[in-house]
Image (spheres, helix red, strand yellow):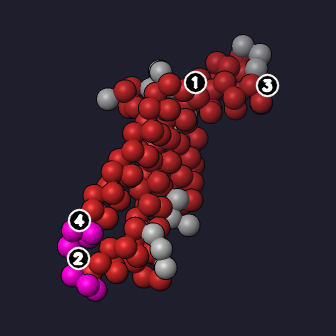
């Protein structure tokens, strides 16, 4: 649930904000509905959709770790919570560092993939 809504909201906003002149120009050049969707709408909306995926991944990762903290028998959240009860701050710090590094790795992976798929997007090349 944490991943779905950021992606959905960014996708809706991205499709709504596609430049109408691009759609009209594509139609004037003879493209049908499917051509407009694949050639114009998808390509124009894709950078913002990827942003929604990145935000959703962050929210989903936090939700996963929080769920492990509350009621799991394994995972990083469980490790941190279990170490808290026995005052093992070294385990807590390693768990927190691991959570951060995995989140950073996943974000960089999505960003790198997006840069390869969409070299025209300035937002991802910043």
Where residue 82 sits: x, y (%)?
Answer: 34, 81
- Considering only order in the chain, which callout, 3 or 1, is on the residue closer to the N terminus? 1
Mark 1 or 3, which is nearer the eye?
3
Mark 2 or 3, which is nearer the eye?
2
> Looking at the image, which residue is at 21% across and 68% down?
90
Q: Which of the pair 114/14 is nearer the observer? A: 114
Q: Which residue is mark 4?
A: 93
Where residue 37 sits: x, y (%)?
Answer: 70, 32
Where residue 88 sits: x, y (%)?
Answer: 23, 76
State left or right for residue 17 relative to residue 93.
right
**Where is residue 31, by image quadrant?**
top right
Residue 63 - label: none
Mark 3 or 4, which is nearer the eye?
4
Q: Which residue is mark 2?
A: 88
Residue 76 covered by magenta stretch: no
State left or right for residue 34 relative to residue 90.
right
Determine the secondary structure under disc 4.
helix
Residue 25 visible in the picture: yes
Mark 3 → mark 4, Cα distance in angstroms: 56 Å
Tell me the magenta residue range.
Answer: 85-92
Mark 4 or 2, which is nearer the eye?
2
Mark 1 → mark 3, Cα distance in angstroms: 15 Å
Residue 32 - label: 3
Mark 2 or 1, which is nearer the eye?
2
């Amino acid at each position: 649930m944490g991943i779905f809504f950021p992606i959905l909201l960014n996708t809706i906003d991205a499709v709504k904000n596609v430049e109408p002149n691009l759609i009209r120009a594509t139609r004037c050049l003879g493209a049908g509905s499917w051509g407009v969707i694949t050639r114009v709408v998808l390509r124009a909306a894709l950078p913002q959709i990827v942003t929604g995926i990145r935000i959703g991944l962050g929210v989903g990762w936090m939700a996963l770790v929080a769920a492990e903290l509350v009621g799991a028998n394994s995972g990083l959240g469980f490790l941190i919570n279990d170490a808290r009860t026995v005052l093992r701050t070294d385990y807590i710090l390693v768990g927190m560092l691991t959570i951060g590094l995995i989140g950073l790795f996943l974000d960089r992976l999505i960003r790198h993939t997006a840069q390869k798929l969409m070299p025209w997007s300035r937002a991802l090349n910043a």
